[in-house]
Image (cartoon, helix red, strand yellow):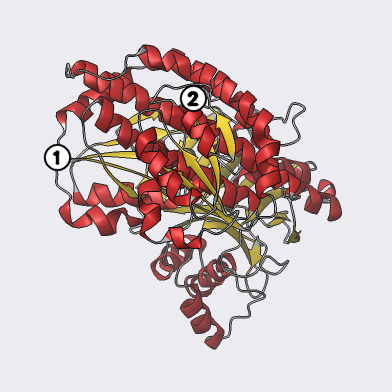
Amino acid sequence: MCGFFAIVFDKENKEMGKILTKAGRRLSYRGYDTSGVVVLDDKGNFDLRKDVGKIDEVANRMNFHELSGKRGIVQLRWATFGYPSPENAQPHADCDELIFGAHNGNVVNTHSLREKLIKEGHKFRGENDGELLVHVVEKYWKREGNMVAAIMKAAHDLEGDYACVLTERYGEKMYAVKKGSSLFLGVGDGFICVSSDLPAILDHTRHILPLEDGEFVEFGPDNFILRDLETGEVIWKEPQHTDMEVKEAEKEGYPHFMIKEIEESPKKAEELLHLLPSHPSYEEAVDLINATEKIYITGAGTSYHAALLGVYYFSKIAKKPLLISFASEFAELHGPVLEDQDLLLVVSQSGETKDVKNVLDYFREHSKGKVIGIVNVLGSTIALKSDLVLPIASDIEISVPATKTFINQVTVFLYLSLLSAKKRMIPSPAGFDILELVPGVVKESIGIAKEKVSEVIDAIKDIKEFYILGYGITYPAALEGSLKVKEVVYVHSEGMYSGEFKHGPLSIVEDGYPVFFITTREDRHMVLSHMNEVKTRRGKIITVAPPDPELERISDIYIPLPTSNYFLIPISATVFFQVLAYNLGVLKGIDPDHPRNISKTITVD
Ligand code: M6R
C-alpha cells in the first residue's frame, strides 16, 4: 500500500536524498510498485525523480543520494488508479509544476473529477488519483490565492479516505491532510516532518502528534498550525514524547522474512504468554465480554481466520457466542441489528486495514458500545481508535503473508476464552496449562512440517488446484492454509467444511485429485466418512492430524501433528500449511515476502 514521508528543514540539507531514501525503506513493508521523491529549495528549484521499482533500486538508478534541499517528499505507491508506470508514480506536480504533492489512500471519485478538470483545461500526465488530488488543489489555489483555503475547498470535492502532503514550488511551508488514512506529525530541532507511518518519523524525532480525521496541518521547519479541515479553525494540540522503539528487521541469515517469521513464532508465543497475565487490559476485556450479550468480532484475511478460531474457542471453552463477519461485510450483515449496548472485537495485525477501520467507524456511528482492538502495531489507527487495546506482542512482521501474528492472535483468543470461563465459573474442557504448550507445539510442528513437506510437494507441485477440508475447530485452519497457498504459490486452493464437500465439490474429484483433510481425534469418525467419500472416487488423501492408524490407512500421505490436544490442532495444522506454502512458493520462483498484486497493509476499500 502507499505510504509517504515529507520533511522541511530550516536550512539546505545536503543529505536530503539519503534521508528520503531511508524513510522510503521504512514505508516499504507495506508492499508497493513505484517509488519517487521531490526535493525543493526556497528559490523555486525542484527535482522530481520517480520510477517503477523498489525504493533502493529506484534510488540507485536515479541517484537520489545526490539530492539536497530544504523540503522533500518521498512516496511509495501500490497501484490502484493507473498502472504502475513512471507517470503514475508519486509525487505529482500540477499543470505548471507550481504545486507538488503525494498521497496515501484512495480518491474514489477520481474518474469523474478528472474528466471535469480536463474539460476545465487541466493537463494530466497519468491516471493516478494522487495526481488528481494535486490538480484539484491547484484549481482552488489559483482561485483563492492561498494553500489553506485551497486545501479546504479541495477536500469538499475529493471523496474517499486518504492522507496527503503538499507544498508550493515558491514557498517554504508544507501542508498535510488527514481524512481517513493515518498521518503523524514529528517535531524536531530545526525540522518538522509528517508521515503515513510512525517508524519513518521516529528515526528523526520522538515528539509526535498523531493527526485525527478531519484535521490538516501547515508546517515550516520551526512551527506548525493545526486546523479543522471543515471550518479552518485552529486546533491547539501539543506533540507528545514517545518511547516507542523502531526495530530494524533483518533477515538474520534466513533467505526470506516469511520463513524467519515462521521460525520466530514459538519465541513470540512465549513472550506473549509472559505478557498476558500481567496486562490489565486483558482482564478488563474479559469483564466487558462477560458483561455483554451481543458481541461482534471481525477482521480480514488471516486476522479473520484467527477471529473465527476465536469464535470456536469462545463457544467451546467459555460457552459464549460471538457473531463473526468479514470486515468488508460487517455493515451489510450486522448493520441493521446493531444496538447501543453491543461490543465489538476488531482483529488486525497492522491496525491500518481499511475494511477493519470502516467497521470501527461504522460501529461508532451506530452503537454506543465499546470497541476492543486486538492488534500488533500499537501506534496504529485501530489501536488509537479502540477503547481497549489487547497487544499480541508479535513484534514487527515484514513478510506480506501473516504467520507468527496468526499464532499469537489465536493464543490471545485461547487465553480470553479460558479467562472468560473461569470468571463466570463455567466448567471448561481445557485448563490454563494448555497455553504453556503453545510454543512447544508450534516449534515441533515447524520441525515435522519441514521433514514432510517435500513428500507433499512431490505430490502436488504440478497441480493447479486442490481442497483443504476441516471439520469444526479445524475449519479455520483449512481456510488459513488455503489462503497461504493462494497468496504465496499462486495456486487455487479452497478451504471448506469437510461435511459440505459432498454437496457439490465432490464431483470435481477424479483419479489422483488431491484433497487435504485436517482433523482432531475427537472428530475422526465423522471425518473418516468424508475421507471415504473422496477415496472411493480415487481422490488422493493427504491428512494433517495427530497420529492415528485408521486415518493413516486411508490416507495417501500423512502429516502426523505433534499434539493431540483438541484446541491446539488448528494451530499446529496451520503451521504445516505455512511451511508448505513457503517451500512451494520458493520452488516456483515466487518471492514469498512480496507476492504479486497484494500488499502487507491494505489501506483501501
Ligand atoms: O493487518 P491485518 O491483519 O488487518 O490484515 C488483514 C489481511 O489483509 C491480511 O491478514 C492478509 O490476508 C495477509 N496478507 C494474509 O497472509
Disc nearer the start of the sequence (1/2): 1
Instruction: Please state the horizontal and vertical placement of residue 599, each as a whole percent of the image.
Output: 58, 51
Q: Which residue is mark 1?
A: 341
Q: SS at mark 2?
A: loop
Q: Is residue 324 above or below residue 405?
A: below
- Residue flagged by tag 1: what amino acid is it? Gln
Residue 207 at x, y percent in the picture: 52, 30
Which residue type carries mark 2? Answer: Ala
The part of the image, by quadrant, that contains residue 567 is top left
Q: Is residue 381 above or below residue 125?
A: above
Would you say 78 lies left or right of 574 here?
right
What is the number of the mark on residue 315?
none
Q: Nearer the viewer, residue 81 or 522?
A: 522
Q: Is 580 rendered above or below residue 496?
A: above
Q: Residue at x 20, y 51 (%)?
A: 366
Q: Secondary structure at mark 1?
A: loop
**What residue do we see at 34% from left, 34% from top?**
310
Q: Is residue 252 visible?
A: yes
**Residue 450 against residue 494 in the figure, above or below:** above
Q: Which class describes the residues within 10 Å of circle 2: few (<14), some (14-19), or many (20+)?
A: many
- Is 31 placed left or right of 198 in the picture? right
Q: Nearer the viewer, residue 41 or 287?
A: 287
Which residue is tagged 2?
A: 393
Marks 1 and 2 in Cβ contact (< 8 Å) = no
User: Looking at the figure, which quarter contains the C terminus?
Assistant: bottom left
Q: Is residue 17 left or right of residue 518?
A: right
